[in-house]
Amino acid sequence: MTVSEILSRGGPLCLDLGCGQWRKSGHVGVDIRADLAAKYADGLYLLHDLSKGIPFPDESADAILSSHCLEHFSFDDGERLLGECWRVLKRAAPLELWVPYGPLYALDPAHKSWYTEDWFEKNLPRLGFKITKEHYVYTPSIQNRKHIFYALWLQDARAARLHLNNVVEQMQVCSVKVDKPTDAKGDT
């Protein structure tokens, strides 16, 4: 489908950026893989290189999901992609991000960046997003033995996540689009 065909369908526009083989139902998948077009018989797929931006008009999207896509961009390019998300989303619309957690996953040659809550808490507000939820998926070995780390968890769960290897597999960050902060000069 083309952008104009997708927009002419009417109804809410929900995007799944870098959807790969697992596009969320009812969302328009946007991915660089040509082989996926045939997979999505409903036609809700747009072949597009996200490093070139998001090809939808300003404030046209009702929601954006991006699961395990952001880490395939450098930090700078990922930040540009998040800026594009801000441009395309309607005001107060949700942005849901899933990423592998922490530097351990930077060992994957396909990953160009890695994320923890520190990065999102520092940068999402600056990019015009208010964080509404952070969720962590713990590794199976920890889920079954969380009692071992319970005392540390009670003292500082954040430190446990950040400093113990193989504790968290992935994280979800949910946010909504808000106004971008202005600096002292009034620039955004």
Image (cartoon, helix red, strand yellow):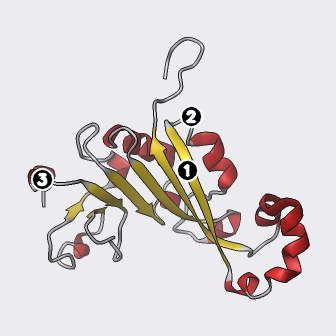
Q: Which residue is mark 2?
A: 126
The answer for how far apart the CA atoms under marks 1 and 2 are is 15 Å
Q: Which residue type does callout 1 highlight?
A: Thr
Q: Which residue is mark 1?
A: 132
Which numbered disc covers residue 10?
3
Q: Position of residue 182 (x, y in %)?
A: 53, 21
Whichever of callouts 1 and 3 sits on the residue coming sooner in the sequence is 3
Residues 148 and 19: in front is 148
Q: Which residue type does callout 3 highlight?
A: Gly
Left or right of residue 120, residue 145 in this image: right
* Element on which disc 2 rests: loop
Q: Name the residue located 25 percent from the left edge and 43 percent from the top edge.
A: 60
* Within-10-Å neighbours for mark 1: few <14, some 14–19, many 20+: few
Placement of the N terminus among the 4 image quadrants: bottom left
Q: Position of residue 24 (x, y in %)?
A: 33, 70
* Element on which disc 1 rests: strand
* Within-10-Å neighbours for mark 2: few <14, some 14–19, many 20+: some
Q: Position of residue 31 (x, y in %)?
A: 31, 63
The answer for how far apart the CA atoms under marks 2 and 3 are is 32 Å
The answer for how far apart the CA atoms under marks 1 and 3 are is 28 Å
Q: Name the residue located 68 percent from the left edge and 85 percent from the top edge.
A: 140
Whichever of callouts 2 and 3 sits on the residue coming sooner in the sequence is 3
